[in-house]
Amino acid sequence: MTTIRKALSRLPVDRFLLLLIATVALAALLPARGSAAGLVDKGVTGAVALLFLLYGARLAPQAIWSGMANWRLQPLVFASTFILFPLIGLGVGLIARGHLPNDVVTGLLFLCLLPSTVQSSIAFTSIARGNVPAALCSASVSNLLGVVITPLLVARVLPAATGGFSPKALEDIALQILLPFLAGQAIRPWIAGWLQRHPRLTAVVDRGSVLVVVYAAFSAGMVAGIWSQLSIPGLAAILAIDIAVLALVIALTTLASRALSFPVEDEIAIVFCGSKKSMAGGIPMATILFPGHAVGMIVLPLMLFHQAQLFVCATLARRYATRSKAPVIPPAAAKACPAPQ
């Protein structure tokens, strides 16, 4: 029994994945209907706003500016996130259309339009002994730019799913995501130290907000009866596509880093920041950009990709760590790094 526990503890399948599965099961058994659905929607709005308020309060601006000094690295990560991934997504959409439900194909494309993660990009870069300040800068800027770039890309690439460019969607994203983030930056001098001393609080808000949004999305899909469209082989196909996309991006960012003669520490930051997609930011955006009943199917590829990137990047980080030297992490950057997600 002890051996089994030790083996399970080494697997990169965290408790959050189990909570996600439990949340989906709860939505299947007890979906929110009628007035309860309205209360859940209000809870989603509040949870997302609180998530980005605390994110803004934790992020040190000076750490971002110090990372921006690496002007060769940042454009490469940006190109991977907002050019390479969307091009791959378009190809995946052409291949998958007709073989998977339309909402799932939309979800695969939406996944490729999202910004990078912040927490896990920094965490894996640190584990791999890469350039942590550069990773902090890349991932943070990606998230900030994604608030505007992702909706514009969605309107361009997925006009049928969203009705085209929607000023109302941008307004909702600004009110629910950007405004709370800016408010968090404004109050950061007074609460940043307190948040650093209470990391569990921010972890609960990070994960709890995502669980609330997942419940709302899958609950709406359950009420609309969309889950009958997806079979077990279809689910396996989505996971296989996710893994293939992730492997392709990791391979291309690695080759590009080496072709441009980046040091290994920078290569690590490029690979981990350029190959990730944010579930914490993506699911709230999906609830704003897409019709309520379709969100559950649309975010499914993102949820599976999230777990795949954790598994693959955990393995890759350990391999990198055996052949690279630890970089010096400035105090400001080290303090600004949030807990991994």
Image (cartoon, grey):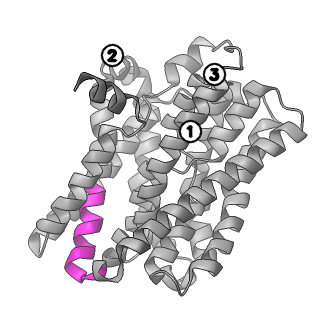
The CA span between labels 2 and 1 is 28 Å
Q: Give the percent coordinates (x, y) of residue 263.
A: 82, 26
The local secondary structure at tag 3 comes to helix
Count neighbours of disc 2 (C-alpha within 10 A) and say few if under 14, some if 14 to 19, many if 20 or more: few
The CA span between labels 2 and 3 is 28 Å
Q: Earlier in the sequence, mark 3 or mark 1?
A: 1
Q: Is residue 321 above or below residue 119?
A: above
The numbered disc on residue 313 is: 1
- Residue 215 falls within the magenta-colored stretch: yes
Q: Earlier in the sequence, mark 2 or mark 3?
A: 2
The amino acid type found where label 1 is placed reads Cys
Q: Give the percent coordinates (x, y) of residue 8.
A: 33, 33
- Residue 145 falls within the magenta-colored stretch: no
The CA span between labels 3 and 1 is 12 Å
The local secondary structure at tag 2 comes to helix
Say if mark 2 contacts mark 3, CB within 8 Å.
no
Count neighbours of disc 3 (C-alpha within 10 A) and say few if under 14, some if 14 to 19, many if 20 or more: some
Write the start and end of the magenta stretch as one range. 212-226
Task: Name which residue lies at 68% across and 57% down.
Answer: 82
Q: Give the percent coordinates (x, y) of residue 91.
A: 68, 73
The amino acid type found where label 2 is placed reads Arg
Residue placed under numbered mark 2 in the picture = 197
Q: Earlier in the sequence, mark 2 or mark 1?
A: 2
Say if mark 2 contacts mark 1, CB within 8 Å.
no
Magenta stretch prevailing secondary structure:
helix
Q: Is residue 94 left or right of residue 279?
A: right
